[in-house]
Amino acid sequence: MFHDRYGARAKLDDSADHGPGAELFLVEGDSAAAAVSGARDARRQAVLPMQGKPLNATRAPRGKVLEHPFFGPLVEALGVGFEGQCEPRRCRYGRVLVLTDPDADGIHCGFLVLLFFHRFMRPLLDAGRVEIVRAPWGEVVAAGELMLAFSEPELTALADRSRGRGEMTVRRYRGLAALDADVIRETCVDPATRRTAGVSTADVAAMIEVIEALEPEGPRAGA
C-alpha cells in the first residue's frame, strides 16, 4: 500500500493487454501523458506520467521512495517486486520506455528515473527491458515537405539545406504536448519507426561516475 504523503499520485493509463508484447511509457507530466496516450496503441501500450522532477533515489530512504507519487505507482504498475525481490519474469510489460523532452530538464528527469532502476530494479536493466526513446527536437517545412530534427545542430543543418526551396518554416518543439499525434506516433511510439537505445546497468553506472566526478560528494538525496 503506497501513501499519498508527497502529493498527487501519478495515474497510470494502462494498456488492455500485458505481458512480453506490452510496453510502459514513462513521460514528463500530464500534458505529455495525454499527448502520448492519444497516439499510442491502447491495446498494448501504457503511459505513466512523472509528477514534477523525480526524487533522486540513489541515497533516499527506501520508505521515502515507495511513498513517492511517481515511484510508488511505478512499482505497482510493473509488478516485479522491489530490491532483492525484483524478478523480470513477473513484469506486466515486456519493455519500459523512458520518453522525456530532449532538453536539459528532460534529460535530468530521465537520468533520475534510471537511478531508480539502478538501485531498486537492476534486474530489469540486466534483462534489457529498459530503453530511452529519442524525441524530436524540431522541424523544418520547405516546399510542403516536413523534415524532423533530433538536435539543434541537425535542425540548423536541415534549414541550411532547405534554403532556396521556396517558403520555409523552422519550428522548435516545446515538449511532447506540442507535437501532432502523427509525429508522436512515428517518432516516439511506433516500434517500427521510433529511435530508442537500450540502457544497461553498466551504462547507468558510467553516468553515475560522471556525475560523481563533477560533484565530489556524489548525488544528493532529493536532488
Image (cartoon, rainbow, N blue to C red):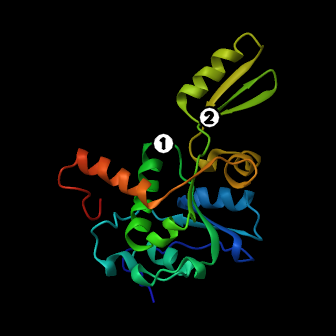
Residue sitting nearer the eye, 142 or 16 = 16
Residue 158 vertical position relative to residue 48 in the rendered view, above or below: above
Give the CA separation, mark 2 to mark 1.
Answer: 11 Å
- Drawn side of residue 34 relative to residue 105, left or right: right
Do we see residue 101 in this rendering?
yes
Q: Where is residue 39 in the image (x, y as percent from the top left)?
A: 74, 57
Residue found at x 43% / y 48%: 105
Left or right of 5? Residue 123 is right
Locate the N terminus by quadrant: bottom left
| Element marked by disc 1 | loop
In the drawing, what numbered circle is on residue 87?
none
Where residue 83 sits: x, y (%)?
40, 79
Residue shown at the point (72%, 55%) measured from the top left = 191
Label 2 secondary element: strand
Q: Which residue bears the numbered disc 2?
A: 138
Q: Residue furthest left?
A: 217
Snapshot quadrant of residue 4 = bottom left
Query: Percent from the top left, x then y, of residue 181?
Result: 74, 50
Q: In this view, does 17 lie above or below 216?
A: below
Which quarter of the image is occupied by the C terminus?
bottom left
Q: Report the residue marked by disc 1.
A: 103
- The answer to whether mark 2 and mark 1 are in CB contact below 8 A is no
Q: Which residue is drawn at 59% across and 56% down?
A: 32
